[in-house]
Image (cartoon, rainbow, N blue to C red):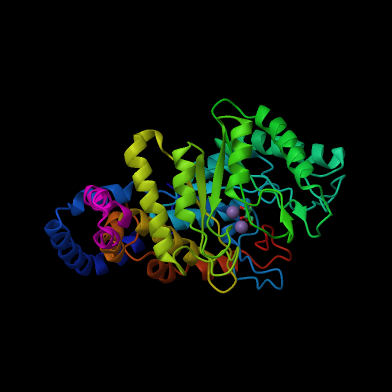
C-alpha cells in the first residue's frame, strides 16, 4: 500500500499511547461487562464502520462571503486522493471517496482508479453538478437545470448526469447523487407544480441510463440558493419522486438540509420503513446548511439518527445498507483534521447506538414506562466510547490519536512545499 505517512512513525505514536489506552479500555470493558455487554464484540463492530469522504471536503471551503485558502491545498483530484488516503490511513474508517463532477473530472479514469486502489481507496457514489455554470457550457442554469423552462438547459443537465454515470462506471462507483439548487426566489417566478413535473421528466431520463447494479439518490434541501421555493425541498418531495422513479431511486438525507429543530431521526425512521433510505451526508449545523464538522454542535441528534439505524438494521438484517458520507466545508480548520474528527464522531454515534439495550428499551416502551425508556438511550449516549474507537483504529492499523499523529508527521507542512498555492482551486464549498 502506498501509505502517505511513514508506518514506522504511526507505530511509534501508537507505542507511546498504548499503555494508557489499554488501561482505559480495561476500565471501560469492566463497566460494560457489568451491564452485560462485551467490549470485544463492540470493538469488532466498530472496526466494520466506514464513512465515505467528499473529495471537495479536503479543500478549504469557505462561505459565500469569503474563502481563506489553506496551505498545501490539493490542486487536483490526484492530490485530493492523496489527502483522503492520509485520513483513511490514520482513522481506518474512510476507505471510499465520493467525487463531484466536473470539479473532479479525471482525464484518465482508469489511471485514477489505479491510483485509488494503490492508496487503499475506492469510489463511493458520484455527484453531479448543475448548480453552477461551467466555462463554455451552451445553456445557463441561472433559472434552473433539471427543472428549467427551456428544454435545451434541461437536456444539457440530463446529459451531464448521464456523463457522470459513465465516468462513475469507469471508476467502479455504484451510484449517483443528484442535488439541484433549482427553485424560485419570488412567488410567481415559477409554477411550483410545473417545476416538479419537469424535474421528474428529467430524472426519468437519468434513471433510464442507470446500469442494473446502480442506484440514484435524490438529495433534498430546504432552501439555498433558492430562497422562496426549492423544488426538492423536503423528504416528502424526495420520497414521492423516488417512488415515482422506481426501485433504484432512493432518498439521501443531508443532516444540514432541514429547518432548525426538525426531527431528522424520525425522517430516517420513515424512509427506512418504506425502503427508500439511500444514504446520508453527515455534518452538523446550528442554523442552516452550515456544513460544520459532524458531532460538533448536536452529537445527541447524531446518536438518535444512529439509534434509528440500529433499529432498522435489527428489523431488516444485512439487506439494510444505507450509504454513509461526510459533507462538510472548512473555513477555519485544517480539512484533513476536521474530516478525521468527523469520521470518528460518526463512528462514535454508531458505537454508542450499539450500546442501547434494545430489549430493555422495547420493554419500557411496551409498558409505557417513559423515564427509563429515555434513560436507556441517555445511558448509551453518555458512555464515553473513546477507548473503543482508539482500540479499533489501532487494531486495524490506524493511529490511536489521528490528529496528534498527523501533526507529528508534518504532512501539511510538506504539502505546502510540494503544492504551491494555485489561484481558484476547484471544489468550492460555497454551496
Ligand atoms: C448542497 O448543499 C450539498 O449538500 C450537496 O450535497 C452538494 O453536492 C454539496 O453540498 C456540494 O458542496
Ligand atoms: Mn450534501
Ligand atoms: Mn449542503
Residue 304 shown left or right of residue 220 in the figure: left
Per the image, is 50 magenta?
Answer: no
Q: Quadrant of the C terminus?
A: bottom right
Q: Is residue 279 above or below residue 132?
A: above
Depth check, front residue: 157 or 164 = 157
Per the image, is 369 magenta?
Answer: yes
Q: Residue at x 63, y 65 (%)?
A: 61
Question: Ligand 3 quadrant?
Answer: bottom right
Q: Quadrant of residue 112?
A: top right
How many numbered circles are shown?
A: 0
Chief secondary structure of the magenta portion: helix
Depth check, front residue: 290 or 10 = 290
Q: Is residue 287 visible?
A: yes
Q: Is residue 298 above or below residue 232?
A: below
Depth check, front residue: 27 or 73 = 27
Residue 399 shown left or right of residue 233 in the figure: left
Depth check, front residue: 344 or 169 = 344
Q: Is residue 146 visible?
A: no
x and y, in percent, of residue 220 in the image: 62, 50
| Magenta region | 352-376
x and y, in percent, of residue 222 in the image: 64, 57
x and y, in percent, of residue 255 in the image: 52, 57
x and y, in percent, of residue 413 in the image: 53, 71
Q: Is residue 176 above or below residue 285?
A: above
Residue furthest to the top: 212
Q: Residue at x 37, y 58 (%)?
A: 349
Residue 63 shown left or right of residue 143 in the figure: left
Residue furthest to the front: 368
Amino acid at each position: 500500500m502506498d501509505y502517505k505517512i511513514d508506518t514506522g512513525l504511526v507505530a511509534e505514536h501508537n507505542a507511546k499511547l498504548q499503555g494508557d489506552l489499554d488501561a482505559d479500555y480495561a476500565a471501560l470493558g469492566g463497566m460494560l461487562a457489568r451491564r452485560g455487554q462485551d467490549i470485544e464484540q463492540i470493538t469488532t463492530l466498530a472496526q466494520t464502520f466506514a464513512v465515505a469522504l467528499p473529495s471537495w471536503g479536503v479543500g478549504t471551503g469557505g462561505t459565500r462571503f469569503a474563502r481563506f485558502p489553506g496551505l498545501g491545498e490539493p490542486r487536483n483530484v490526484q492530490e485530493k486522493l492523496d489527502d483522503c488516503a492520509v485520513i483513511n490511513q490514520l482513522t481506518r474508517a474512510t476507505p471510499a471517496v465520493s467525487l463531484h463532477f466536473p470539479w473532479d473530472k479525471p482525464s484518465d479514469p482508469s489511471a485514477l482508479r489505479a491510483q485509488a486502489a494503490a492508496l487503499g481507496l475506492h469510489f463511493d457514489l458520484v455527484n453531479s453538478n448543475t448548480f453552477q455554470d461551467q466555462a463554455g457550457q451552451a445553456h445557463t442554469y441561472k433559472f434552473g437545470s433539471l427543472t428549467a423552462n427551456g428544454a435545451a438547459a434541461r437536456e444539457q443537465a440530463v446529459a451531464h448526469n448521464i456523463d457522470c454515470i459513465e465516468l462513475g462506471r469507469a471508476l467502479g462507483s455504484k451510484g449517483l447523487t443528484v442535488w439541484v439548487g433549482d427553485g424560485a426566489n419570488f412567488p410567481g417566478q415559477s409554477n411550483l407544480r410545473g417545476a416538479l413535473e419537469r424535474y421528474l421528466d428529467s430524472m426519468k431520463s437519468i434513471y433510464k441510463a442507470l446500469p442494473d447494479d446502480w442506484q440514484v439518490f435524490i438529495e433534498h434541501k430546504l432552501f439555498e440558493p433558492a430562497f422562496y421555493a426549492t423544488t426538492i425541498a423536503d423528504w416528502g418531495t424526495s420520497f414521492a419522486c423516488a417512488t415515482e422513479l422506481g426501485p433504484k431511486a432512493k432518498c439521501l438525507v443531508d443532516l444540514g438540509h432541514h429547518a432548525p429543530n426538525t426531527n431528522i431521526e424520525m425522517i430516517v425512521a420513515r424512509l427506512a420503513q418504506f425502503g427508500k433510505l439511500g444514504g446520508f451526508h453527515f455534518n452538523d449545523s446550528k442554523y442552516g446548511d452550515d456544513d460544520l464538522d459532524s458531532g460538533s454542535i448536536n452529537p445527541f441528534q447524531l446518536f438518535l439518527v444512529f439509534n434509528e439505524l440500529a433499529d432498522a438494521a435489527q428489523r431488516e438484517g444485512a439487506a439494510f445498507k444505507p450509504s454513509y458520507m461526510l459533507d462538510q466545508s472548512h473555513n477555519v480548520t485544517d480539512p484533513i483534521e476536521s474530516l478525521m474528527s468527523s469520521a470518528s464522531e460518526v463512528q462514535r454515534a454508531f458505537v454508542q447506538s450499539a450500546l442501547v439495550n434494545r430489549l430493555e428499551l422495547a420493554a419500557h416502551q411496551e409498558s409505557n414506562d417513559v423515564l427509563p425508556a429515555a434513560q436507556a438511550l441517555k445511558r448509551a449516549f453518555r458512555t464515553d466510547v473513546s477507548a473503543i474507537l482508539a482500540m479499533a483504529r489501532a487494531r486495524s492499523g490506524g493511529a490511536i490519536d489521528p490528529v496528534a499523529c498527523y501533526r507529528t508527521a508534518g504532512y501539511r507542512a510538506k504539502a505546502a512545499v510540494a503544492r504551491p498555492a494555485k489561484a481558484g482551486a476547484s471544489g468550492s464549498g460555497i454551496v
